[in-house]
Image: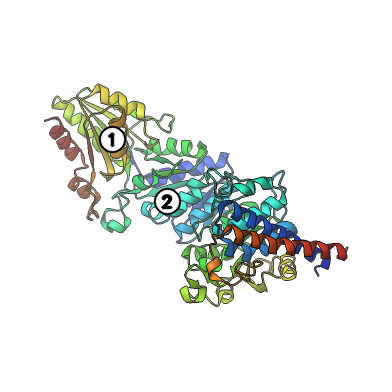
């Protein structure tokens, strides 16, 4: 089931570079961040479409907006907090309010820059960017989804925020077209629903399989579009199982769990438990150990599901 | 050299635009008049003397573009767009009303001719840099004009953008600093001293000229000289008078934002329409 491990940044850069061959409107912006974002080949193949701006994320968002007004499709990737929290007002006004066709990608998202500490973690990016009207928020879960989500993102007319991680991630799925706003049922089950997004889905699959061995039937949903959330799938899951547990490498507040809770509270009241990082400045250390500390590894998810069902 | 007919004609247009500004303020009973009137001669000259635009085809690809980085001066932009024929003048009477196409800061999705949603300061120049990069290969003559307030200069994002414009040799960028010297809390130099503005832009690699931004001859002669230096973006430090054209408000900080009584608004209207009539007469004599 779990396949080859691949670098998400390289897979992302490769996907954009491949599509740039067919679409000469695609341009890439860098805040001294392009090569670490997988754009080494793009810069070599399309130097006239590669704009290095140096370390100025606020400026880059504005430049991207201006380029988009001329019909270009700018893609800007850098470390997640620096393309979301830092230039938030530029994102809101220059991309959201101006409805510009710009794709912003936050890499090394969540706590994946684990040992670099809280300045380099992005644990509120879903929460703040989803509040900008008209912006799509994506968190692909494996290398195949990164590839297909990039295609969907570039074909979508309007601002998109995508977050990807840093360490290599395994192939989890067979490649299939990515539909913005749609989740996927990874495991069918009747006791409880687990909804996961982005980097935590691998652990969620392992947890669901372990639980199955213990006689707990988990309906596992992968939700690579955080906003707009797949309401239909959330409502269906609420009706089919006894409750919902959400899992994300983000604050437990404000992200996927909150979006699911919003749907449930208004359309299908059901108990929702939100797994994520508590609202604090996360600690630092080896990535796997940090995820385990915050209960976001397979064991932690398994434990939370068992407690939820007690 | 600019000829006298051109100058008088533009002064007359600017005066009509000032009438449009007062019309909007009368409709809403308030507005950011000071900065609008200080930059109004520049905005008039840019649209009526320099820009390649067509109000009937506002999105034509080879057009020049105008960005009002200091979005609160939008009364100037609305006044000029109306005079240029982008929208019927009746729309001016909706300023301040529910769902108006001309809100307190410009919205490109509501009004034809607006190129960027400004209002938050320090955004215009980086958007302009992106436009300049985006158009220069296909339309080498297309220019991006920006009006920025002097009170807006401390925003760090301006200097990020100033670096981009210089690094990429964007000589299709024409930036006017509306240097009226006053902002809401006092004199710009007292609030945050950004002088010497010209030397700062020069240090960032720009070609720079100081002008009297309310002198139509100086404004159009500068516009006729763009780019001042090939390969460099142009910064024009336009020394202006806050609330220019309304004698009571000229150089008066209280006129940054003005909520006139009916009588005050009517007096302003009369002062400016008298000026328009005098210019019409002068214009006729010049012919």
Alpha-carbon neighbours of circle 1 within 10 Å: few (<14), some, or many (≥20)?
many
Q: Position of residue A134 (x, y in %)?
A: 46, 40
Viewer-nearest residue: B194 or A173: B194
Q: Disc 2 vs disc 1: Cβ atoms closer than 8 Å?
A: no
The residue under the point 28% across, 27% down is A268
Q: Quadrant of the C terminus of chain B?
A: bottom right
Sequence-wise, which precedes: disc 2 or disc 1? 2
Q: Chain of mark 1?
A: A
Q: Residue at x 73, y 53 (%)?
A: B52
Q: Residues within 10 Å of mark 2 (few under 14, many from 20)?
A: many
Side (left or right) of B125 relative to B45: left
Tell if the residue under mark 2 belongs to the same chain as the one under mark 1. Answer: yes
Q: Nearer the viewer, residue B221 or B134?
A: B221
Quadrant of residue A250 within the rendered picture: top left
Horizontal relation, residue A114 to residue A96: left or right: left
* Label of residue A37 in the image: 2
The mark found on residue A261 in the picture is 1
Residue A251 in view (yes/no): yes
Q: Which mark is residue A83?
A: none
Residue B136 appearing in the image: no
Residue at figure coordinates x 28%, y 38% from the top left: A257
* Secondary structure of the residue carrying numbered label 2: helix
Q: Is residue B75 left or right of residue A148?
A: right
The colour mode here is rainbow
Query: Percent x, y for residue A184?
Result: 34, 28
As drawn, A234 above or below A286: above
């Amino acid at each position: 089931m779990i396949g080859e491990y691949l670098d998400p940044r390289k897979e992302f850069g490769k996907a954009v570079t491949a599509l740039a061959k067919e679409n000469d409107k695609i341009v890439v912006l860098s805040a001294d961040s392009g090569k670490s974002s997988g754009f080494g080949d793009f810069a070599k193949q399309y130097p006239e479409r590669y704009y290095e701006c140096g370390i100025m994320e606020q400026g880059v968002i504005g430049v991207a907006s201006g380029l988009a007004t001329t019909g270009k499709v700018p893609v800007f990737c850098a470390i997640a907090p620096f393309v979301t929290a830092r230039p938030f007002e530029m994102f809101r006004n220059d991309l959201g309010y101006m409805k510009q066709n710009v794709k912003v990608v936050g890499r090394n998202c969540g706590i994946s820059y684990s040992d670099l500490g809280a300045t380099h973690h992005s644990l509120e990016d879903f929460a703040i960017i989803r509040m900008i009207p008209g912006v799509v928020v994506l968190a692909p879960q494996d290398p195949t989804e990164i590839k297909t989500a990039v295609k969907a993102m570039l074909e979508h007319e309007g601002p998109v925020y995508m977050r990807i991680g840093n360490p290599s991630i395994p192939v989890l799925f067979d490649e299939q077209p990515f539909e913005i706003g749609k989740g996927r049922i990874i495991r069918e089950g009747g006791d409880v629903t687990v909804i996961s997004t982005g980097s935590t889905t691998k652990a969620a699959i392992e947890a669901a399989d372990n639980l199955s061995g213990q006689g707990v039937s988990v309906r596992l949903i992968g939700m690579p579009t955080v906003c707009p959330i797949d309401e239909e799938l959330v409502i269906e899951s609420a009706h089919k199982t006894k409750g919902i547990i959400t899992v994300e490498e983000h604050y437990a507040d404000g992200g996927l769990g909150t979006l699911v809770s919003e749907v449930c509270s208004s359309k299908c009241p059901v108990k929702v438990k939100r797994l994520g990082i508590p609202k604090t400045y996360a600690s630092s250390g080896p990535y796997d150990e940090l995820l385990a500390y915050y209960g976001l590894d397979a064991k932690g998810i398994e434990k939370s599901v068992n407690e939820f069902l007690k | 050299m600019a000829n006298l007919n051109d100058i008088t004609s533009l002064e007359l247009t600017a005066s009509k635009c000032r009438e449009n500004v007062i019309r909007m303020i009368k409709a809403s009973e308030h507005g950011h008049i000071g900065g609008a009137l200080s930059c109004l001669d520049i905005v008039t000259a840019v649209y009526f003397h320099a820009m390649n635009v067509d109000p009937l085809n506002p999105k034509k690809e080879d057009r020049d573009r105008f960005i009002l980085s200091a979005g609160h001066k939008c009364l100037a932009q609305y006044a000029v767009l109306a005079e240029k024929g982008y929208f019927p003048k009746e729309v001016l009477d909706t300023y301040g009303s529910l769902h108006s196409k001309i809100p307190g800061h410009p919205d490109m999705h509501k009004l034809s001719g607006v190129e960027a949603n400004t209002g938050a300061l320090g955004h215009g120049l980086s958007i302009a840099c992106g436009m300049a990069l985006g158009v220069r290969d296909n339309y080498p003559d297309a220019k991006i004009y920006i009006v920025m307030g002097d009170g807006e200069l401390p925003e760090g994002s301006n200097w990020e953008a100033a670096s981009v414009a210089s690094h990429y040799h964007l000589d299709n960028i024409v930036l006017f600093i509306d240097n009226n010297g006053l902002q809401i809390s006092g004199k710009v130099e007292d609030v945050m001293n950004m002088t010497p503005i010209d030397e700062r832009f020069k240090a960032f690699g720009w070609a720079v000229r100081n002008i009297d931004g309310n002198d139509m001859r100086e404004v159009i002669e500068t516009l006729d000289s763009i780019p001042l230096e090939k390969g460099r973006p142009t910064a024009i430090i336009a020394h202006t008078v806050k609330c220019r054209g309304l004698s009571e408000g000229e150089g008066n900080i209280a006129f940054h934002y003005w909520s006139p009584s009916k009588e005050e608004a009517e007096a302003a209207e009369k002062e400016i329409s008298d000026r328009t009539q005098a210019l019409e007469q002068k214009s006729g004599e010049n012919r």
